[in-house]
Amino acid sequence: MLISSLIQQANEKWFNVQKKTTEGVQSAKDAVFRGGLIIICGILIVWISIFLYTAFYYAYMPSMTHVRPVHLQFKSCDKDKGVCSFPSAYVQLTKKQQLLMVGQPYKVNLQLEMPESPANKELGMFMVCAQLRSRDGVLVKHACRTAMLHYRSTLLHLLMTLTYSPMMIFGTLEEKQSIVLELFGNFEEDQSHPVTIVYVEIQSRHIEFYSATIMINAHLSGLRYLMFHWPILSAIVGIGTNLFFIVLICILSYLHFASEEENANETFNYEKGESEEEKDMILPGDLGSDTSSVEDTSLLDDIPKSQDDSPSLSSTDPVLSKSSYIQEISSLITESTKEELNK
C-alpha cells in the first residue's frame, strides 16, 4: 500500500510539472506571438504615417522654381547694319494644360546677361515688356519694367580690371553684368485661363546681351513656408500627428469591437439562462404527465383482471355492443381508481 501511494504521488507530481511546463510554453508562445503582432502593427502604422505625410507634401507643396531660356529674335535691316525691330520671343512654359498651382503666388523674373560694352553704357535706360497668355491666346496679364546697367566709374572699372585680370585672361571671369527684372510680383494662376506662354519684348534696338532667362519662383507663406524652410521639423510634426490619429482610431476601433463582443457574450449567457429556467419550469409538468401515464397504464393492466373476475358477463353476452363495452371499461376504471384511493 505504501509503495502504491508513493507511486501515485510521484505520478501526480510529474503530471502537475508537465502541465505547468506545457502551460508555460503555451503562454510564452502567446506572448511572442502578441509581441510580434504588436511590432508588425507598429511598423505598419509608422510607414502609413510617413506615406501620408509624403503624399500630402507633394500634393500641397508647389514646385519652387521654373526656369526657361528666352531666345530673343529680331528683324535685320535691309540697307543698314544692325537691328531694325525690337528683340522679342514667345516662351512656352509647358505642353500640358497647366504648370503653376492655383492659389499660389509667384514671382516672374527676367534675367539678362549684358556685357559692359560702350553701346550698353551709352544706351542708358531701356524698357522690357512681358505678357502672360493662356493656351488659347487669351491675355491674362501684362507688365513693363525699366532697366539699365549698374553704374561704375572709370576708376572703379580700372581697379576691378587690374584685380581680376588673371581670371579674365584665363576666361573664368568676364566683363558682364547680370540684370534681374521682376516682371510680375505675387502673380496667382487663374484656373479658367492657366498661363502656358510668356511673350517678352525688349523695347530697344541698340541693346547688346549674351542671354536671357525667365525664372518663375514660388512666393511661399504660412504652412508652405514652414514646410520648405524647416523640412525636418515639419516632417517630425506631420508624421507624429498622423501617427497619433492613426493610433487613436485603432484604439477606438478595438474598444468598439471589444464592447460589441462583450455585449454579444452577455446576450448569449442571458438567453442560455432563460432556456435553463424554462427547462426547470417544464420538468414538474413532465413528471406529472409521467405519473398520470403510469396510473393510466396501471388502470389498463387492471382491466383484464376485472374481466377475469366477471366471467358470467362475458359468457352470457359474448358479443357486446360498442356503448356497453365503453360503459364497462369506464366502470372498471372508476373501480380501480377507488381502490387506489382507498389504498
Image (cartoon, rainbow, N blue to C red):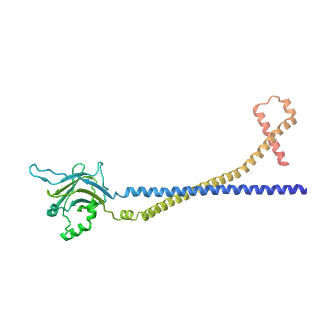
Where residue 126 sits: x, y (%)? Answer: 16, 61
Q: Residue at x 85, y 33 (%)?
A: 313
State the image quarter where residue 219 is shown: bottom left
Which quarter shows the N terminus? bottom right
Residue that lies at the very extreme toward the right in this rendered image: 1
Where residue 288 sits: x, y (%)? Answer: 75, 48
Q: Residue at x 44, y 56 (%)?
A: 52
Where residue 213 sits: x, y (%)? Answer: 25, 56
Which of the two residues, 107 or 224, is positioned nearer the viewer here? 107
State the image quarter where residue 125 is shown: bottom left
Residue that lies at the very extreme toward the bottom in this rendered image: 155
Left or right of 181? Residue 335 is right
Which of the two residues, 330 or 113, is positioned nearer the viewer here? 113
Q: Residue at x 21, y 60 (%)?
A: 114
Which of the two residues, 253 or 81, is positioned nearer the viewer here? 81
Where residue 276 sits: x, y (%)? Answer: 68, 52
- Total numbered labels placed on residues in the image: 0
Q: Residue at x 82, y 48 (%)?
A: 341
Left or right of 255? Residue 335 is right
Residue 186 appears in the rendering: no
Left or right of 136? Residue 42 is right
Residue 227 appears in the rendering: yes
Residue that lies at the very extreme toward the left in this rendered image: 79
State the image quarter where residue 158 is shown: bottom left
Which of the two residues, 259 or 285, is positioned nearer the viewer here? 259
